[in-house]
Amino acid sequence: REEAEEPGAKRARAEEGLAARIHVNRSPVMILWAASCLERRGLAPGEALSVASAAASAIAGAKAASLDLGGWGQAEGEERVGVLGVAVSARRLDGELRGLDKEGKTIDPSRVSGLLESKFEAQLSPLRAEMRRVAAAFEADDLAADDGRLVYDLYASFRPAVAAGRAGWGAKGSFDVAKLSSLAPPVDETPADSEARPELLLPKVERP
């Protein structure tokens, strides 16, 4: 049985054409969320997608190693950008920041966009808008602190539900969009006497 949604979150999704639940694996959700938070910190959209993809790859490599599935590390780069609790290797390409893949090659943001489009299809545009709205509710400095650890903790509170261990590796799960939206309630639903966003009680999540 599905839990009841908050009225405001349901109304916002209806207006934007965003589904209440999306059946998808975790990686594209992580990438799109991390990119939204990097944009909040001032990166251009292409830079954000490239760096977010590199971070998701690094986390996947560590997870694979923890499951005895091989795993991989990061190549060395000229710069480091912290996001999702990871210091991502990056370099400048024609003046723009690019994350590096595990072989040390720059990640083309157009390829990342293509991946996201194939995973989210018609839901990509409204979901990106909602993630940007939620990311904007947080201070850029908070999203950057400790290599962007808060970005990962927030992601862990709404990521798709999959089985633990090897059974969940690469598997699709139910992404409850209401959990994302609840991190930043619409302004008209915020109590009038509230001057600050309520403290979030996030689960304690350990990354591999």
Image (cartoon, rainbow, N blue to C red):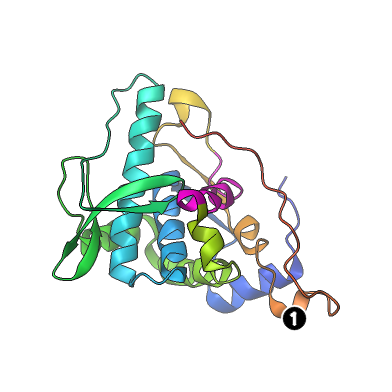
- The verdict on residue 152 being magenta is yes
Compared across the picture, whether 3 is left or right of 16 comes to right
Q: Position of residue 79 (x, y in %)?
A: 26, 54
Q: Residue furthest right?
A: 193
Q: Position of residue 72 (x, y in %)?
A: 27, 31
Name the residue that disc number 1 marks.
Answer: 188
Compared across the picture, whether 207 is left or right of 197 comes to left
Q: Residue furthest top?
A: 68
Q: Name the image quarter holding the C terminus.
A: top left
Compared across the picture, whether 102 is left or right of 40 comes to left
Q: Name the image quarter holding the N terminus.
A: top right
- Of the pair 86 and 117, the residue shown nearer to us: 86
Is the residue marked by circle 1 packed among few (<14), some (14-19), or many (20+) residues within 10 Å? Answer: few
Q: Is residue 13 above or below residue 167?
A: below
Q: Is residue 206 above or below residue 67?
A: below
State the residue at coordinates (37%, 31%). 62
Q: Is residue 153 above or below residue 190?
A: above
Q: Is residue 151 above or below residue 182?
A: above
Tally of marks: 1
Residue span colored magenta: 146-161
